[in-house]
Image: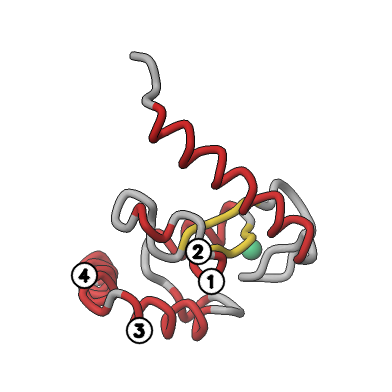
Amino acid sequence: MKPTKKYQAAKASYNVTRAEIYGERDHCCEGCGTWQGPIACSHRIPVSKRPDLRCDKDNIDLMCHPCHELVETGKYDDLANGKAIHHYIAEIDPQYLQEKLNRRDFLAA
Ligand SMILES: [Zn+2]
């Protein structure tokens, strides 16, 4: 299937955001501080949930793969920037935060 113009525009704008973030921040993981391995952009609230926040730099952290997994599973307490992530999501989308924490607790039980 051919990508739509809207999708292409969104992708181009995200590429700009990503390049800006790489230019502005240290290339280390914001969750654990490692410089090892691939460090990639990780969305606090995923694009699938909030496409409107795809290019919101406050919604994006540079993270190693293990820390990205912690965000995915709602284990914010294990991250150096976990409080900031928690506060951001609580402010922007409290319902999503609750879903995430409920799921984390369900998996831990
Ligand atoms: Zn990390």
Mark 4, residue position: 99
Residue 83, relative to residue 44: is it above or below? below
Can you identify the residue that label 1 sits on? Answer: 58
The x, y position of residue 39, in whole percent, is 68, 52
The residue located at (77%, 54%) in the rendering is 36
Q: Amino acid at mark 4?
A: Glu
Decide if residue 102 is on the left or right side of residue 81: left
Q: Amino acid at mark 3?
A: Glu
Of helix, strand and loop, which one carries label 1?
helix
Q: State the image quarter where residue 104 is shown.
A: bottom left
Mark 3 or 4, nearer chain start? 3
Spatial CA distance of label 1 from label 4 is 20 Å
User: Is 109 in front, or is 44?
Assistant: 44
Residue that carries the numbered disc 3 in the rendered image = 91
Element carrying mark 3: helix
Query: Residue 44: horizontal and vertical position, in percent?
Result: 45, 65
* CB under 8 Å between discs 2 and 1: yes
Q: Which residue is mark 2?
A: 56
Q: Are marks 1 and 3 in contact (CB under 8 Å)?
A: no
